């Protein structure tokens, strides 16, 4: 589920990992027994553009992302979810090699038939509504 704030300055998400029927529940129970009831590992990955400057913040409970426009966005998740930044790549049209990038990784362990993962992305401060961080080469300069 995704929910965009009315002003476009926040996005909340909820991912649900769940068993759908008895066969799924039996499979889950078998895997839990194999894991000695330690839970089944999961990960959600959010890949970032190479020009986003991302760093862990708030004691590892958030990721601050600075854009070229000067905007700063903050990605958060609930306390039970591990939040890390890891290397990634960006495949760009017209380039022979991938560009280095980062990804936000949420991870945890499913302990029940349904596991809810909540996260949010929000602007850290107010900025103009029409701020853009990309300039086209053929754009006319404004005076």
Image (cartoon, rainbow, N blue to C red):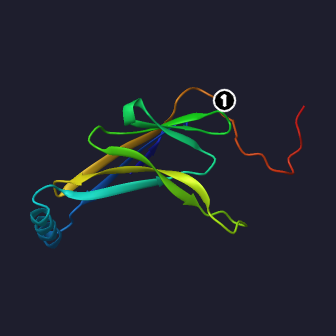
Residue 6 seen in the figure: no
Q: Position of residue 102 (x, y in %)?
A: 52, 51
**Foreground residue, 14 or 85?**
85
Q: Quadrant of residue 34?
A: bottom left
51 vs 122, left or right, is right
The C terminus: image quadrant = top right
Q: Position of residue 55 (x, y in %)?
A: 50, 39
User: Which residue, given by chain and number where applicable, does mark 1 sit on?
Assistant: 128
41 vs 122, left or right, is left
Q: Position of residue 89 (x, y in %)?
A: 56, 59
63 vs 24, left or right, is right
Picture mark count = 1
Q: Position of residue 99 (x, y in %)?
A: 62, 58
Task: Classify 10 Å Cα crowding around label 1: few (below 14), some (14-19), many (20 and above).
Answer: few
Residue at x 59%, y 51% (from the top left corner): 49
**Foreground residue, 132 or 111?**
111
Residue 80 seen in the figure: yes
Residue at x 14%, y 55% (from the top left corner): 38
Q: Quadrant of residue 69?
A: top right
Q: Is 2 situated above or below 6? A: below
């Amino acid at each position: 589920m995704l929910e965009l704030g009315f002003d476009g300055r926040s996005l909340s998400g909820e991912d649900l990992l769940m068993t759908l029927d008895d066969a799924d529940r039996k499979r889950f129970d078998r895997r839990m027994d194999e894991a000695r009831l330690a839970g089944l590992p999961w990960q959600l990955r959010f890949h970032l553009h190479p020009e986003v400057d991302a760093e862990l913040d708030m004691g590892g409970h958030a990721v601050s992302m600075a854009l070229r426009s000067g905007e700063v966005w903050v990605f958060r998740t609930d306390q039970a979810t591990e939040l890390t930044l890891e290397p990634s790549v960006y495949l760009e049209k017209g380039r022979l090699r991938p560009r280095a990038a980062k990804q936000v990784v949420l991870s945890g362990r499913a302990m029940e038939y349904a596991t809810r993962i909540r996260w949010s992305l929000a602007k850290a401060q107010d900025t103009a509504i029409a701020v853009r961080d990309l300039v086209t080469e053929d754009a006319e300069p404004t005076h």
